[in-house]
Amino acid sequence: MILNNLYGVDIDEGAVEICKLRLWLSMVADIEDEPSEVEPLPNIDFNIRQGNSLIGFTEVQEIANDEGDASLTNYGGGVGQSVREMYDDVITAVERHRDARSTTEATNARDLAESHIERHSRSLNKKILEQFQTAGLEDATLREVENNHPFHWVLEFATVYRDGGFDVIIGNPPWEVLSPNRDDYFVKYDEAFRTRMPDSKDSKMEELLQEDSIAEGWEEYKEELERGAAYFNESDEYQLQTPEVNGKQVQNENDLSMLFFERVFDLLGGGSYTSLILPGNIFNGASAKDLRKHALDHTEIQDIIGFENKGIFKEIDSRYRFGIISLRNGGNTEEVRGIFEQNSLGVLRNVEQNTFLIPSRVLDQYSPEARIFPNITSEREVEVLNKILYHPPVSADIDNTWYASMYAEELHRAKESDYLVEEKDKGDYPVFEGKNIYQYSYDDTYADDLAPISLWSVNENRPEKSGKHRVRMKNFRSHNPDISIKKAIYQKFNGTGSQKGFVNSLLEEYDRPELSKEDVLLDCTEYRIAIREIANSTNERTLVASVIPKGAITVHTLSTIRPYKVNPTEEDLSEYPMHDIYERVFTDQELFAALGVLNSIPFDYLMRTKVDTHIVKYKFEESQMPRLTDGDNWFNYISDRAAKLNCYGDQFKEMRQRLGDIQPATITKERRRIQAEIDAAAMHAYNLDKKDVQFILDDFHRVSNPRIMDRDYFEMVFEKYDVLEQNGPKP
């Protein structure tokens, strides 16, 4: 079994020798007759090998000849010779070693095989050198490549590749990033270094670095790792490490587990299986998006078991998450058997019984932007999520209906403090922070514990101190076509060459000045939704939103939803300032319908599965919400009620008039009832049935001393759901 089926690789030579010893001892234990019948230890030398699994060829390649490079696939076909023909000398020597019946015969065969492997490796290493140089390490040398211990799988395991490749790959790759680790280096000079306390490590490190050779070696070690990181970042060997999320490239920190996961895809043949223990980032980190997408689209994921480390690995923090993924290469994933948030290995004793089926649609659509996997713990949760995910992402611009585009930061409280004042009499308008709002509240009139406004700014006649001027200039220089007038005009009118030159030349044709900051229409000229940036999945409510008064701006702890989009027409080009280029994203009624669903229990239920401590822009914008518009069953019901809750006070007098002189809800009991009605209506808007609603309400995290979400409130929501199911959305 061991000789013919088990193979392994480790970069640590000591680990390789320990592994071979343990395998040999297991063979000894299995022998029921005389120990002399056990084959000599050297016979598994070519099963367990030393080398860098991440650098080296997983398919046959040979040095360029007169006809150019010849390469073969993992399984012996392709251009040029077969695997057997190319590495027949290695295969013959390895098989002689395996079949040897004496120590001398085994030693001779091993030495011959190693010499052939070394000779072929030198040729392949020259190609690795080309990869290093192509990756920007132009001064790399063959010696540097060899110091990285490239492992050429098809050469080192030629007998396996001759027979079709690996059937099963099992692994527990390192859960760390490729960066200098003083434990790994200084343990060579102090065996107890790893176990020392931090202060002791500092002093011991300082002591050891007094010796020139150790200090020089430390610098060489750090440089070697930095160059290795450059190879992984810039070479073409790893294509799934830098995904794009929310229009920006996510650069990982050379996470070794991610690199190993991608390498496994290269090693698997059609129909081969793998099972890997991987850190939580692989399942829910933005940087692993392309790895998850590849697994869904090009393999059949069979099982995913997610764990929270409650005593499983004593050396690791109890909050650390990790998981086991098993998949079959080829095809795509239709459904996965899985479960998350487990804190015991008992689930592995009977995976089929202890898990449930998760449709790939849930894994795919839960996070369409980052493709993170939800931490699902029950089959009922799958059913509820499947219904919620039926709806479009809140930021999707569909059929010219409203959508929510988050403006994450108008001003930064610390970095742009020059534009803020803390004395009301020195400011001209308020600057809102996250602590200044709660659901449907923009002051402490109905939310007693809200902090009063403590920041203000000045008008634009003092541009060097004006927050509004600062925001105006940010928008004027923006590259986002939904915000940037210049870019929107350039794209709409098929611009060529310089954006600035094209746009200003076009405006000149319409007898108006060059584009300027006066053309920008500030978001604060309209009522808009604001969302607390700091949040937690264990708060009473995770997503906290309110419509804030016109004229106010915000700092980074309070994100806003853009009230305008830029849509240039030919008629706009002659206007100055060009404010007609801005179109409202929401009608007044749509604004409050959106607010109602944003503040609802079902949307909050979805958001708290994604949120740790902050409402991240892409996680918010990819989250699903019913796109309620005029004529939809629950549109007026939710919009009218959300407006009654939010449109109180003198600052919303204009909005109340625009909505038909509505009367705000001013009595606490009435406001509580209205919010429960919105929550119940949102459940219907999401097409959730009574069992779904009961599950969400039972599963919803509850806090001590809640503002509103006490037991009676949950019961009221359920009762209102029943009433609405029978009577529909009557006023």
Image: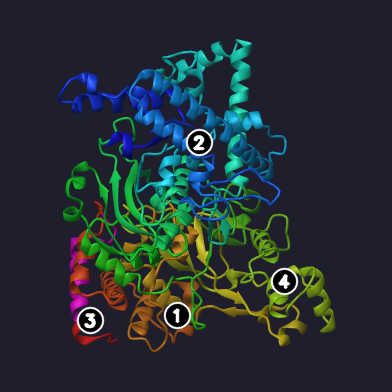
Cα–Cα gap, marks 4 and 2: 66 Å
Q: Nearer the viewer, mark 1 or mark 2?
A: 2
Residue identifier under label 3: 724
Question: Can see residue 471?
Answer: yes
Residue 726: x and y in percent read: 18, 85
Q: Give neighbour class at mark 1: few <14, some 14-19, many 20+ (Cα, 10 Å).
A: many
Residue type, label 3: Leu
Residue identifier under label 4: 486
Quadrant of the image occupied by residue 41? top left
Cα–Cα gap, marks 2 and 3: 79 Å
Residue 5: x and y in percent read: 32, 40
Q: Secondary structure at mark 3?
A: helix
Answer with mark 3 or mark 4, whichever residue precedes in sequence.
4
Cα–Cα gap, marks 1 and 3: 21 Å
Q: Give neighbour class at mark 4: few <14, some 14-19, many 20+ (Cα, 10 Å).
A: many
Cα–Cα gap, marks 3 and 4: 48 Å
Residue 590 shows which numbered tag?
1
What sort of colour scheme is used for the picture?
Answer: rainbow
Residue type, label 1: Glu
